[in-house]
C-alpha cells in the first residue's frame, strides 16, 4: 500500500526539487555537511534559472573550493591564492557582455588576496564576488584566518586567537561596503532552508544587477561552517556558528543600491 | 480540501550522512540508516514517509545535493 | 614601407601593442619602463582599436589580470622592470602551467633588491630558467634595437599562441630609454569574438550546450596526471628548441674569437669588434635573439674554427653558463660584464677578451 502510494507520487510531473544540471555529477570533495556544496548549488541554480550558462565565467580560488570547476558545469578558471578578483577583472574588462564571478574563502579573499579584493571593489568591477567565511583555513588543516573570532581555537591558535598579538577578526565585508565601487553588499548563510532561500535571493539579486549593466561590484558573503576545522559534527557546527559567528558577523544586507543600510 | 503528500529520493551512494537534512525536516520524516554506503557513510532515508509534505527543505539544505523531492495533491 | 617614427624603445613596445591588435594591457608603473603605460594612456587605445588599458594595483594584479584574460582567449600583455617581474613570477608559473599565451616585457634594471634604475642584464637566469616555481620555460626574445622592440611584439604573440605559452621580451633600460628610428608595421585588426572562439576552442568564453565546459587550471592533484602534464610541457619545450631558435651572426666567417652577447651588450660588442679588427684581431659576434631556446647548436657548430669565446653580459655571469653548456671544455669560454647598472664600454670588452681569452 505504502509502496504503491510512493510510486504514485514519485513521477516526473510531481517533481518539486532536483539538483540543477549546472552542477556536474562529480561527487563533491567537501567534508560531510560543509556549506561549500550548498553555496555552489545555489549559484548554479540561479545561473540555470536565468539561462546564463553560456554567458557565465567563474573563477575558483585556492582553498577547499579549488576544485569548484569540477562541480560547476560552466566555463571556469582556477586562480592563484587570492588573485581571483584580478583574473575576473581581466576577463570582465575584455568580455564586458559576460557574467563573471569569483568564489573565494576567507584566507583567499581577506588575507593573501586583500589587495586584489579591495581594488577590484574600489574600481567597481562589474563582477560578483561570493565570499565564503568559515573563520578558518579549511584546506590546509584548520589554521587561523583573518576572520577567526577572538579567542577562537585553531591549529595555529591552539590557546585561542590572541588579538593583541594576532590582530582582530577582519570584517572585510563591511570594509568593501564602504567603497564607492560596490553597489550591493550582503551577508548570508546556508545552514537552514530559510537561510538558503535568502542567500539564493541575494545571489539572484546580485546577478540581476550584473546583467542589468548596473555599475559596480556585487558582494555576497556567506557565513559558513568548517566542521573539520572547528572539530564539530555538522549539525553542532551549525549551532556553534549561529551562537558564535553570527553575533560578530550579523546576517543581512549591508549595502543596497549603492547606499549603506542603517 | 486537497491534501498534499510528498516523497523524497536520496541518492544513498552520494549521501555523506551529515544529518543536516534531518535537522531541517519539519515533520521528522528522515533518519539515518543503520547500513552504510560504499564510502562508509550512513545515509538519510524516509523513516516516516507518511509524514512527508514535499516541502523540499531537506533537499535545499543538503550540501551534496543528493535529495530529489516529489509532491502530489491527493483528492479526497 | 611602413610609417617611420623616432621613438623610445618603451614607446615602440606600446605602439606595437596597439598595432598588433592586442586586446588588453594591464600594468603598473616602474622605471625604466613607465613610458609603456604612459604612451598607451596618451594614445587612447580604447578609441584606436578597442584595446583595454588598465593601471593595476600591483604587478601581482597585472599578471593575474593577464592570466584571466589570456584564459578567455584574449591577446593580452603586461610590461615591467626587474622588481615588478619578480612579483609576477607566481602568475607566470600559473600561466605556463595552465598553458596560456601572453606576452610580458622586462625592461631590466640593476639589482638585487630595489637596486638601481640603470640598465642591467642580471635577470637572465630568472627569464630563461623558468623564474617561478615548477618545471617550465618562457619563450624569451632579446631585442637589441628600438626596431626590434616593436617587431618582437607580434612575433612574441605568434610564438605565445603557437605554443600556448607565455613569451617574455627581455630588454633593458638602455634599449627601453634610447631613441631610434623605427619602421612601424601596419595596424592589424583585433580578432572578433567569433574568431577567438574558433581559434581558441579551449578558452573560457562561456559554455554553450554544444561543447563540454572549458577549464583553465594548472592543478592536477593526482601525481601521475601531473607527471603526464609535465611531460607534455617538456615535449613542447623540446619542440621549441628544435624549431624556434633565432640568432644573428656578425663577422663570423673568419672569426677566431667569438663574442656571445644579446641586447645592449650585443650592440657594444659590435663596436668592440670594429676596434679589435682594426688591430687585426679576427672577432665575430653571435647574438642570440631567443635566449630560450638558446642557440646551442649554432655555437657548437662554430667551435672547430674558434680559439675562444667571451660571453658579454651586464651581469656577474649568467648566460656564460649556457655558453659553457654548449662549448664544454673544448675551447676557453669566459664571462665579462659590468654590474649594478654600469654599461661596459667597447674598450673594456676588448681588454677582457685579450686578458681572459687571448692572453689566458
Ligand atoms: C601562495 C600560497 N600560499 C599558501 C597556500 C596554502 N593554502 C592553500 S588554501 C589556504 C587557505 C585557504 O583558506 P580559505 O581561503 O579560508 O578557504 P577554505 O579552505 O577555508 O575554504 C592556504 C593558506 C597556497 N596554496 N598558495
Ligand atoms: S575542511 Fe572545512 S571548509 Fe574544507 S571541506 Fe571540510 S568542512 Fe568544508
Ligand atoms: S520534503 Fe520536507 S517533509 Fe519531506 S522529507 Fe524533505 S523536509 Fe521532510
Ligand atoms: S543532508 Fe544530504 S548528505 Fe547530509 S545526510 Fe542528508 S541527504 Fe545525506
Image (tube, coloured by chain):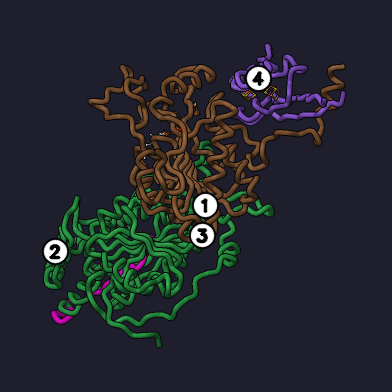
Chain colours: A brown, B purple, C green
User: Magenta segment: does it hold C284?
Assistant: yes
Q: Nearer the viewer, mark 4 or mark 3?
A: 4
> What is the secondary structure assignment of the residue under circle 1?
helix
| Residue on which disc 1 sits | A210
> What is the secondary structure assignment of the residue under circle 3?
loop
Give how far apart the Cα atoms at labels 3 and 2 are: 44 Å
- Circles 4 and 3, Cβ within 8 Å, touching? The answer is no
Q: Which comes sooner in the sequence, label 3 or label 1? A: 3
- Which of the numbered marks, if any, corresponds to residue B26? 4
Q: Are marks 4 and 1 on the same chain?
A: no
The magenta segment is: C277-295
Numbered disc 2: what chain?
C
| Residue on which disc 3 sits | A95
Q: Nearer the viewer, mark 3 or mark 1?
A: 1
Q: Nearer the viewer, mark 2 or mark 4?
A: 4
Disc 1 beta carbon < 8 A from ligand 1? no
Amino acid at each position: 500500500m505504502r509502496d504503491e502510494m510512493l510510486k504514485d507520487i514519485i513521477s516526473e510531473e510531481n517533481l518539486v526539487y532536483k539538483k540543477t544540471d549546472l552542477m556536474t555529477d562529480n561527487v563533491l570533495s567537501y567534508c560531510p555537511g560543509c556549506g561549500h556544496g550548498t553555496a555552489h548549488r545555489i549559484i548554479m541554480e540561479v545561473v540555470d534559472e536565468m539561462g546564463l550558462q553560456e554567458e557565465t565565467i567563474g573563477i575558483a580560488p585556492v582553498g577547499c573550493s579549488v576544485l569548484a570547476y569540477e562541480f560547476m558545469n560552466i566555463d571556469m578558471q582556477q586562480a592563484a591564492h587570492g588573485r581571483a578578483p584580478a583574473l575576473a577583472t581581466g576577463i570582465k574588462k575584455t568580455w564586458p557582455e559576460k557574467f563573471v564571478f569569483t568564489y573565494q574563502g576567507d584566507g583567499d579573499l581577506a588575507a593573501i588576496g586583500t589587495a586584489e579584493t579591495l581594488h577590484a571593489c574600489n574600481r567597481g568591477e562589474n563582477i560578483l564576488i561570493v565570499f565564503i567565511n568559515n573563520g578558518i583555513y579549511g584546506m590546509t588543516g584548520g589554521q587561523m584566518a583573518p576572520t577567526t573570532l577572538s579567542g577562537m581555537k585553531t591549529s595555529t591558535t591552539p590557546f585561542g586567537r590572541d588579538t593583541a598579538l594576532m590582530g582582530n577578526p577582519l570584517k572585510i565585508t563591511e570594509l568593501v561596503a564602504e567603497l564607492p565601487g560596490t553597489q550591493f553588499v550582503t551577508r548570508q548563510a546556508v545552514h537552514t532552508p530559510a537561510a538558503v532561500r535568502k542567500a539564493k535571493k541575494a545571489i539572484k539579486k546580485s546577478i540581476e544587477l550584473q546583467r542589468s549593466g548596473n555599475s559596480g561590484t556585487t558582494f555576497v558573503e556567506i557565513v559558513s561552517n568548517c566542521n573539520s576545522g572547528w572539530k564539530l559534527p555538522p549539525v553542532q557546527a551549525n549551532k556553534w556558528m549561529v551562537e558564535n559567528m553570527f553575533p560578530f558577523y550579523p546576517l543581512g544586507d549591508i549595502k543596497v543600491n549603492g547606499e549603506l543600510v542603517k | 480540501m486537497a491534501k498534499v503528500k510528498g516523497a523524497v529520493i536520496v541518492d544513498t551512494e552520494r549521501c555523506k550522512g551529515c544529518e543536516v537534512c534531518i535537522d531541517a525536516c519539519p515533520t521528522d520524516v528522515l533518519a539515518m540508516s543503520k547500513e552504510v554506503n560504499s564510502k562508509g557513510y550512513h545515509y538519510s532515508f524516509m523513516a516516516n514517509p507518511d509524514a512527508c509534505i514535499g516541502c523540499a527543505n531537506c533537499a535545499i539544505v543538503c550540501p551534496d545535493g543528493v535529495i530529489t523531492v516529489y509532491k502530489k495533491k491527493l483528492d479526497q | 614601407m611602413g610609417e617611420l617614427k623616432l621613438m623610445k624603445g618603451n614607446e615602440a613596445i606600446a605602439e606595437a601593442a596597439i598595432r598588433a591588435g592586442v586586446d588588453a594591457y594591464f600594468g603598473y608603473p616602474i622605471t625604466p619602463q613607465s613610458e609603456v603605460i604612459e604612451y598607451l594612456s596618451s594614445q587612447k587605445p580604447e578609441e584606436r582599436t578597442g584595446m583595454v588599458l588598465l593601471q593595476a594595483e600591483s604587478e601581482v594584479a597585472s599578471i593575474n589580470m593577464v592570466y584571466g584574460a589570456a584564459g578567455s582567449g584574449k591577446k593580452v600583455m603586461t610590461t615591467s622592470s626587474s622588481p615588478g617581474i619578480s612579483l609576477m613570477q607566481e602568475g607566470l608559473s600559473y600561466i605556463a602551467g595552465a598553458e596560456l599565451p601572453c606576452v610580458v616585457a622586462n625592461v631590466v634594471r640593476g639589482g638585487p633588491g630595489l637596486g638601481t634604475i640603470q640598465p642591467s642584464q642580471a635577470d637572465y637566469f630568472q627569464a630563461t630558467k623558468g623564474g617561478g616555481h615548477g618545471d617550465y620555460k618562457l619563450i624569451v626574445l632579446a631585442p637589441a634595437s628600438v626596431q626590434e622592440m616593436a617587431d618582437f611584439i607580434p612575433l612574441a604573440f605568434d610564438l605565445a599562441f603557437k605554443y600556448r605559452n607565455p613569451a617574455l621580451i627581455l630588454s633593458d633600460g638602455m634599449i627601453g630609454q634610447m631613441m631610434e628610428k623605427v619602421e612601424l608595421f601596419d595596424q592589424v585588426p583585433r580578432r572578433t569574438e567569433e574568431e577567438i572562439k574558433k581559434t581558441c576552442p579551449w578558452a573560457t568564453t562561456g559554455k554553450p550546450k554544444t561543447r563540454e565546459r572549458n577549464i583553465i587550471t594548472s592543478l592536477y592533484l593526482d601525481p601521475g596526471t601531473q607527471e603526464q602534464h609535465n611531460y607534455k610541457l617538456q615535449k613542447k619545450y623540446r619542440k621549441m628548441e628544435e624549431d624556434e631558435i633565432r640568432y644573428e651572426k656578425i663577422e663570423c666567417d673568419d672569426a677566431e674569437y667569438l663574442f656571445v652577447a644579446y641586447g645592449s651588450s650585443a650592440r657594444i660588442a659590435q663596436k668592440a669588434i670594429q676596434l679589435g679588427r682594426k688591430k687585426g684581431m679576427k672577432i665575430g659576434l653571435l647574438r642570440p635573439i631567443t635566449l630560450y631556446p638558446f642557440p646551442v647548436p649554432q655555437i657548437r657548430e662554430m667551435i672547430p674554427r674558434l680559439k675562444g669565446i667571451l660571453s658579454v653580459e651586464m651581469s656577474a655571469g649568467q648566460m656564460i653558463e649556457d655558453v659553457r653548456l654548449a662549448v664544454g671544455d673544448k675551447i676557453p669560454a669566459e664571462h665579462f660584464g659590468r654590474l649594478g647598472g654600469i654599461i661596459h664600454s667597447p674598450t673594456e670588452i676588448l681588454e677582457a677578451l685579450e686578458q681572459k681569452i687571448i692572453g689566458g
